[in-house]
Image (spheres, grey):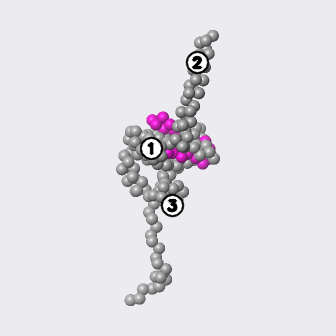
Amino acid sequence: VVLPILPGWILVFLTIFSHSRWSDLLNPNTFPKNAASIQIKPLQFQLDITYPGLDGQFNTADDINTINELYLAYNQPVQIKLLAQDVIHSFFVPEFRIKQDAVPGMPTAVWIQPIRAGEYNIACAELCGAQHYRMMGYVHVVSPDSLASWLKSQAPEAPAPAEPETTKGKEKQP
């Protein structure tokens, strides 16, 4: 009689014991304060990834955008903000032991700190449509200097300075 009940009690104990720890891992207030931020907005069947530009703000002209290519610095914490654009997707990187669902209308976030340089696969672990099998991306974990160089190379070019008003429309005199 005790043998079938014992595993059930063990599962109940583990659930109660791990709930607070799991909640801490997903609570943005407990994320490292020095963590960089990256937005990932999954869309059938791609990952739209956005890095803030020099101003540190998202949705500005200096944002850096990639599709299916995530670049991270090793030993540097990063907060990943997820927001699905159409259906439920997930951000799943087995080597990082992370899987977080992205639900339309429900922003979620996770933080990671890669400890090894290398190339890793990002998979969508939620059935998101007929082309679900094609939805994958890549994580490139590089040195902090390499990441800074890459971000600098991807930054949008500043617009050319506007011509002063006093010279507009006037022809040069010989």
- Give the magenta part as a residue range: 79-98
Amino acid type, mark 3: Ala
Q: Mark 2 points at which residue?
A: 7
Residue in the image at 48% along x and 34% along y: 97
Q: Can you tell which quarter of the image residue 142 is in? A: top left
**SS class, disc 1:** loop
In this rendering, the count of numbered labels is 3
Q: Is residue 91 magenta?
A: yes
Q: Mark 1 points at which residue?
A: 77
Residue 154 at x, y = what percent?
43, 56
Residue in the image at 60% along x and 19% along y: 9
**SS class, disc 2:** helix
Q: Which of marks 2 and 3 is in front?
A: 2
Residue 93 at x, y = what percent?
48, 38
Residue 81 at x, y = what percent?
54, 46
Can I make out residue 4 in this image?
yes
Q: In this view, does 56 lie above or below 172?
A: above
Amino acid type, mark 2: Pro
* Real-space Cα separation, disc 2 to disc 1, in angstroms: 37 Å
